[in-house]
Amino acid sequence: MSPDLLHTSPRSTPAAVGDFHPVRVIAITGGKGGVGKTNLSVNLAVSLAEQGKRTLLMDADLGLANVDVLLGLSPRHTLADLVAGRCTLDEVLVEGPDGLLIVPASSGFRHMAELQPAEHVGLVHVFSELQRALDVMVVDTAAGITDSVLTFCQAAQDTVVVVCDEPASITDAYALVKVLSRERGVDRVHVVANMVRDPNEGRRLYEKLARVCERFLGDVALHYLGAVPQDDWLRRAVQRQQAVVKAYPGSPSARAINDIARLAARWQPPAAARGNVEFFVERMISGSVAA
Ligand SMILES: Nc1ncnc2c1ncn2[C@@H]1O[C@H](COP(=O)(O)OP(=O)(O)O)[C@@H](O)[C@H]1O
Ligand SMILES: [Mg+2]
């Protein structure tokens, strides 16, 4: 990684006064691959942008990125260029629907999937330098319980765990929540059930996960955020490389994700820094100093 990325002090380029607005950061994760994290991230971000929220979508699946593929984008630069010191974060940004800003990553560069913990923290801090007025950032994490996933969830104010009706999804989600709570102090997790086949399945899956968490990890609060149905319209939108909330807004999955986005849009931005690794923390510190 370029030494600049790790050592630049975010305060060396102060944001304009209007940019001190705190940003609500939502990490989408789940432990298991293929449960729909990227589709939820992309559609949640597009939906929030449609609802007028100034939204940034970060592809934090650093080794196998595919937010750009889902949105049919051909980015000139990615986070790999930023990490190599070839460009700034601002130059990595791509504009999507409704003014949504996207931070694409790269696929097939193994070193990006194997960054050091300090480099993940460095990446989190680079966002504080962004000279953009934002309300919310959605972070699409990789599968697994690697350092990148844990650091990006720890650095967000909200973690959304995506599960589906497969035994491995529930056990992986539990493993992730356990490590997040024990090692990273995350004590609150939202749950979205994806690819559900009937309206009650989502809550059943949530309750299954909540039961084991309650039994073995007493100090984590789980909240049920909603369910997204199994939907061929979503698959069709993926083929067209468009967000389903844009391509087929009346479809069952689009309506469900719009409902989730409406709930998330009401979450308040953070009032103060928590004192550990956190996205846009300098804006919070500067904001509270300015206030
Ligand atoms: N609600 C859904 N209905 C139908 N197919 C879905 C749904 N959510 C995700 N998929 C499909 O599941 C696969 C995995 O989704 P993806 O978002 O890439 O998962 P992850 O990021 O968790 O690996 C994709 O082929 C996607 O089209
Ligand atoms: Mg993904």
Image (spheres, rainbow, N blue to C red):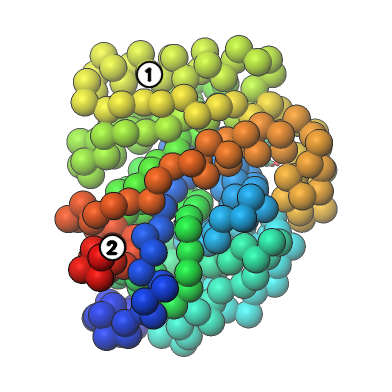
Which amino acid does the dot numbered 2 rest on? Met
Numbered mark located on residue 210 in the image: 1
* Residue in the picture at 60% in, 46% down: 44
Q: CA distance from mark 2 to mark 1?
A: 32 Å
Q: Give the vertical position of 181 relative to 133 (above or below).
A: above
Q: Quadrant of residue 108?
A: bottom right
Classify 10 Å Cα crowding around label 1: few (below 14), some (14-19), many (20 and above).
many
Image quadrant containing the N terminus: bottom left
Quadrant in the picture for residue 289: bottom left
Residue at 30% x, 49% y is: 154
Q: Relative to 30, is 97 above or below?
A: below
> Which label number is shown at residue 284?
2
Q: Residues within 10 Å of mark 2 (few under 14, many from 20)?
A: many
Could you tell me which secondary element the residue under label 2 belongs to? helix
Q: Position of residue 232 (x, y in %)?
A: 80, 33
Task: Give percent across and percent down for residue 281.
Answer: 28, 63
| Number of numbered discs on residues | 2
**Mark toward the start of the polypeptide (2 vs 1):** 1
Q: Is residue 281 visible?
A: no
Please state which of residues 19 and 117 is positioned toward the viewer in this rendering: 19
Residue at the image position 65 percent from the left and 66 percent from the top? 99
- Measured as percent of width and height from the top left, residue 158 is found at 38, 43
- Front-most of 66 and 42? 42
Q: Quadrant of residue 78?
A: bottom right
Secondary structure of residue under mark 1 = helix
In this rendering, the answer to whether 128 lies above or below 269 is below
